[in-house]
Amino acid sequence: MKKKRVRPPKTQIVPAPRSQLIIASLIFCGAITLMSLIVLRWCKIPLGQQFNYRYSELAELKTATGLWPIVVMLAPLALSAWCIARSKFRAVGLSLGMLCILLLALWTALAIPRPIRQHSVNLVSPSHDGAFVMEAHDIPSLPDYLRNFSQYIHRSVKSMGGTRILANPPGMTILAVWERRIFPVSHSWLTPVERYLIDKEGVDNDEATFMFGHGLRFGMILLLMWALSAPVAYLLGRQFMAPLGAALFALLVTFNPCTVHFSPGKDAAQLLTINAMLLAWFNGVRRDRIWATTLAGALLLVGAICGLIHFWIAIAALAASLWQSWSEGRFKRDVLKHVVAATVGFLLLALVIYFAWGWNSIGTLIATGRLYNKVKNTIGINEKLWFFIGLPIFLLFVTPALWTTLFLNFRNGLHDFASRFRRSSRTDLRNRQATANGARLFLCTAISMALSYTLGVSWELPRVWIAYLPLLFLATMIDVPLFRSANARAVKPILVIVTVSMLFTAIHWTLLDVRESEYRAILTNRAWY
């Protein structure tokens, strides 16, 4: 009789305790990033070439005056998390959380030294978002301007004072023109903004002051758009996660080093249109709602009129959704229904715009895209150098919360992560255990970022790639049980992530002067030129 061989027990992967993994990854990644910035600053190594992110020369002052509000804000955020985790108090918790995000947006605008002087640089300078304000000053008729936009953008970079108008569709210029129509400032009609500039800043009641007033109001609008992107981000997160996980998602996408350094500004404000587009798309695909995907197509056009990067975001979301539908055996239905619906929504809005203003918006987007190479060559960027330093510089702006959410996906080993790419079996679908789509979304987002990096912009990524933050956090959070089914037990680990992320963002903010507004407005006193 043969003896049965005793097989050695299979090696089992014992996942690390979740709390230890969260705390260790947050502290390690945050410390590595901040220490790298401090060492680079101490060695006087510039962050970039041509586009150089300056180190702040007012770091001590910003630390003394700007950090304490962030520490104070942690208490109401903790109360908000406690309420959101309990259905009875969820509405109160969400209201308190969104109020906190609004206060964080105000902190971003007002915590900097001499905020009015600094914003006057960014919001009137032709090399920053002030280019849209200055462009709006010379537009007597907006429909005529839009109809002839393809000819306007062929002006030289020297005559424009920068590439901001030439490299972007006219969406932000439209917003700046509307601001002027709503607030037609003159010598006889001043708003509180102009009165403040005249009384407190000592400027004259002239056209230059009116320009600064328009710039500051335009900045307020961009700041409000950025703050309003948070509740839309929450609704986007709720498509995949529990209320507490979605609230964390909204905070991380809205308040991080990239958005704080470039607010108020166009790129952070674009989170409103990006979040709205993604919300409509995923809501339509996941719940089989044609009207939602049609709306997503229309929102894609609205967003693209503000920034062409919306197309890169849409491509990543579309690829991930089609991959997921193929896995669940719904590929043909999704292709024929939702993709066509989104296309119809895009074209219908383009037709409405054309009949209302006589403006070929699609032709404008094509003309702006074709002009990219000309603008890039005019700037004089060393593309080979930026190909190697662009991504590392972006990583210095990444919040440790992103790395933590990514590491949580690998908590059960690489085999578990790889299994999420398999096609769902009939048993999975019958038992509602279809493979989650976070891994697929992450891969599609990474490919989209790689394509935009090699074919598009490899410099200024901390500003340009703000648009990718919703997809990145969605991809790394929706497969993690802590966020997908967060309950009262998840409050403590989520508060740890919130605390470290906010403190990291605030400290990061003290170290840099990325738009040189401190240098130009305070240290060299050039704010009013």
Image: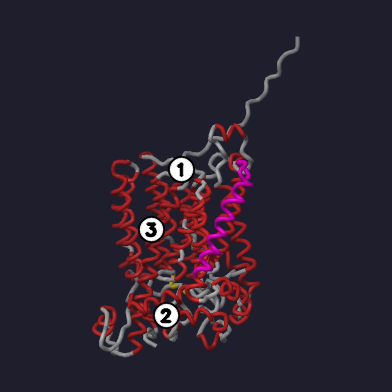
Dot 2 or dot 3: first in sequence order is 2
The x and y percentages for residue 141 are 44, 83
Label ID, residue 162: none
Judged left or right of residue 489, residue 72 is: left
Numbered disc in front, either 3 or 1: 1
Instruction: Give me the disc on residue 503.
Output: 3
Image marks 3 and 1: residues in contact by CB distance under 8 Å = no
- Residue at the location (31% across, 49% down)? 93
| Residue at mark 2 | 133
The residue where tag 1 is placed is 484
What kind of residue is marked 3? Leu
Residue 32 visible in rendering: no
Question: What are the residue bounds of the magenta stretch?
Answer: 326-352
Crowd class of label 1 (few under 14; some 14 to 19; many from 20; radius 10 Å) = many
Badge 3 element: helix
Judge whether 235 appears above or below 34 on screen: above
Q: Magenta segment, principal secondary structure?
A: helix
Q: Nearer the viewer, residue 505 or 291?
A: 291
Residue 493 vertical position relative to residue 348 in the rendered view, above or below: above
* Type of amino acid at the residue the image marks with label 1: Arg
Label 1 vs label 2: CA separation? 43 Å
- Residue 132: x and y in percent read 45, 79
Residue 318 percent across, percent down from the top left = 58, 54
